[in-house]
Structures are given as structure tokens and as C-alpha cells.
Amino acid sequence: MIRLPGVLLIILLLSPLKDQAQDQDPAGEMRSLMESCQFSQAITMAELFLLHDSTRTDLFLLKGSALSALFRYDEAITALRNAQKLDSTNIRVFNELATVYRLSGDHGKAIETIEKVLRIDPGNRYFILQMANLCYQEKKFRETVNILLQVYYLDTLDFFVIKQLANCYEELKLSDSAEFFCRQALKIIPFDPFVTGKLANILIRENEINTAFFLTALFLKKDPVNIPILKQNAYCNYLLLDFKSSARQFWECIKHGDSSKFAKKYLGLSYYKQEKYDSAAPLLRRAFYADTTDAEVCFYYAVSESRSHGNDTALVYFQRTLGLLMPSGQFLSTLYAELGGAYTLTSHPDTALFLLRKAFDINPHSNILRFKIAYQYDYYLHKPLEALPYYREFLKNAPPPPSPENTIPQQASTSGYMRAGSQEITIPYTEYARNRIREITKH
């Protein structure tokens, strides 16, 4: 029996394995490494093999994919362009190159690459949709519509295409077309939450509140705790002046985890509209601190504090509202009037009168402000003669039937001034003004 030296025996045993490894395709080895996420090893292998054979399109393609997986986009693009030079009609190379351009944020180059693919294969649906997505991401909505309509006319039941057309038309502010495609999408998938929410938003913007309410209410029968739809339905109730229902539903949103400023704001305003100022104030405060630039929330929080006896806090937030922006004339007039009321309640009637007159300067057609200025002179400053012309002008401009809210608490007294007492009655502004004119002129 012949005994071989140990080293020779090992060489002979390993020789078949070495030959087998040499015979295996390097592309297959690279794919195996990439499947196990060993991208660096795959790149090293590609570089070794390409040193000996730089004509392998598949190795450049795999190298580019491995580099892209490691976020080395510039190197990946170089590898893929080398592959493209070797095979200028290889659609897989074009697709990978477009993907890397997109991942690197260069959507312009990605679009150029897909345009080249579509010149090679014009009817390729996959690349047409890729082009549409890239145009959409670039905010080229008209181009996106033109691309998607070609696909839509070939298949009018493609949910993705229809939904994306609705998105584009909404971005283009073409509400009729956006609404049409939303309705088309809902015929295919009737209770899709994204499309339902988008259609509801369009309807609300177009002031079709009842239709939006019906749409969201129908959806909520199927999914009663879908927060975005529940919130839209609550907002519809608010716009329809059903403040009890809107408060109940916004509260449901918050109970199920909605911490948005929108829910807090409109729950607070729903309580405010019901004159539940104690309930409104903390919610509006939370909404304001979620967005301290919202002058509207700041204002209504100040009013709620004022009317729930938080006068010092109200003053701070009225002043803060003034500092946030220069509102419209109507809003600014209301703001000055409310601020005047707050100063009255904190025993600063002179400041209050100054603010009421500023409000009246901005809105000189407000008959209510005439009355408030007269009353401020008369009751708080005890200057009835200064009040007299305002009372007279108020009566001259007063409508025949007094509005129910235009009443004032009046304590029966010989002087005509309101006094603190246990039994309070209210009389219309017009009647109060007539009484005071008669009493002032008499005395």
C-alpha cells in the first residue's frame, strides 16, 4: 500500500473543490451573497472578476445594486452607466439606474432614464406608472395627468390610477374633476378611507356640507372609530351649527387618541358656541399651545376666560392676539370690543371706553357698538350727557324688532342705573335707550 505525504493528500482532496468553485458563475455567487445581505463581499467579488473581464454587463448591474443597497449612490450610478455602455437596450439596467437616481433624490435624471426606456418599449405599463409617480413627486401634476389618462382609457377600473388622477386634479384645484375620479374610485372600493376622506374634503371646500356629512356618516356605519373620518363628520356638524353633535364627536376623537390641534380647537369652539365657556377654555388653551401663531384660537381662548371670570388671563391673551397679526377690520373691531369688555370687568372703564371707540372707528356701521359706548359713558363712567348722543344715534339706526340677544340686565331703580341685586330682569337695548334718553333729558 502506497502512503502519500500529508500535504500532497490535502492538495489532491481540495483540487476538485477548487475546480468546482472556478466553474461556478460569479454572478450566481454574487446573487447568493446579496440574498444574505453580504453586499460588501458581493462588491469585492464583482471588482475582482471585472479586473479580468470588463465586458460583463450582469456583473456591473449586480455591483450597482449592491452599492445602492449600501447607500453608495454615486458609485452605483457609475457601475450602472458602465453596464449601460455595454448594453444600451438592457431594460433591467435602465430600471435599476432610474431607481438609484430616484433614491438619490435626482428625479430629473430618473425621468430622463425612464423616457429612454419608453422609447425602447413604448407600451410598458410598469415604466409608464413609474414615470407618472416621478412626475407627481416633482409636482408636475399636468404631466402626471396626461400620462395617467393614457392608462385610464385602456383600463377604467384601475383603482391606483383613478386615485392618483383624483390627487392630481385636487392639486391643480380642479375640484369637479377631482370629485369625479374620487367617486369613480369609490365605485371600485366603496369604503376606502383615503378616497372617502379626500372626497369629503373637496365637498367641504365646495360648501356641499350636507353631502359631505352624508358621505362620512355612511362610512362611519361601517367603521365607527376611524378617526380622520369621524373628525370630518364632526366638523360637518360644526359647520351645520349642530354644536352638541360636533362636541360629542370631537370628544370621541380625543377619547380614541386623537391629539391633533384641530380636534382640540373645534371641540373647544363647539363648547364656546354653546356658551359653555368653562369647558371651552382649557381645550382652546391646549389648542393654542399646540400652535401659538393661531390668532383665532388665542382670541376665543381669551373670550372664554373672560366669560368664565378669568379676567386677568383674558387681558393677557387679548393683548397677545393683537400682537400675533393685523386681522381683518371686522375681526379687529370685535377684538377691541371684547378687550374693552375685559377691561370693564377689571375696573378700568376709561381704557374700556377707549377700546370701544377704536372698535367703532374701524366698524362705524355697528349699531351695537354705539349702544355699548353710550352705556359705558352712562353706567360705568357716570357721564350721561356724553352718552346721550350715542343713545339717540343708536335708536335712529335700530331695526324695528329688537334681536333676542340685544338685551341688557336691568335692575329697577329711580336713577336708571343697574344696581347689584337678587332679582334681575332683561330688557331690549332699544327700550333701555329710550328710558335713559327720557331720564337724562328730564334731569
Image (spheres, rainbow, N blue to C red):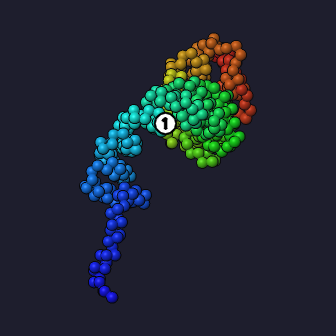
- In the rendered image of this protein, does residue 80 appear above or below residue 362? below
> Residue 90 lies in what quarter of the image?
top left
Q: Which residue lies furthest to the front in this view?
A: 1
Q: Which residue is drawn at 70% across and 33% down?
A: 421
Q: Where is residue 302 in the image (x, y as percent from the top left)?
A: 55, 36
Quadrant in the picture for the C terminus:
top right
How packed is label 1: few (under 14 Cα within 10 Å), some, or many (20 or more)? few
Q: Where is residue 332 in the image (x, y as percent from the top left)?
A: 51, 25
Element type where label 1 sits in the image: helix
Specify the amino acid type for callout 1.
Answer: Arg
Q: Position of residue 180 (x, y in %)?
A: 59, 27
Front residue of 406/139: it is 139
Q: Is residue 210 left or right of residue 69?
A: right
Q: Which residue is drawn at 57% across and 24% down?
A: 176
Front residue of 250/305: it is 250
Quadrant in the picture for the N terminus:
bottom left
Q: Which residue is drawn at 69% across and 32% down?
A: 214
Q: Can residue 49 be seen in this view?
A: yes
Front residue of 225/432: it is 225
Q: Residue furthest bottom?
A: 1
> Residue 157 lies in what quarter of the image?
top right
The number of callouts visible is 1
Q: Residue at x 29, y 83 (%)?
A: 4
Residue that label 1 marks: 125
Q: Which residue lies furthest to the left in this view?
A: 51
> Residue 218 lies in what quarter of the image?
top right
Q: Is residue 230 left or right of residue 47?
A: right
- In the rendered image of this protein, does residue 96 appear above or below residue 320? below
Q: Can residue 347 be seen in this view?
A: no
- In the rendered image of this protein, does residue 406 appear above or below residue 257? above
Q: Where is residue 124 in the image (x, y as percent from the top left)?
A: 47, 36
Q: Is residue 57 left or right of residue 171?
A: left
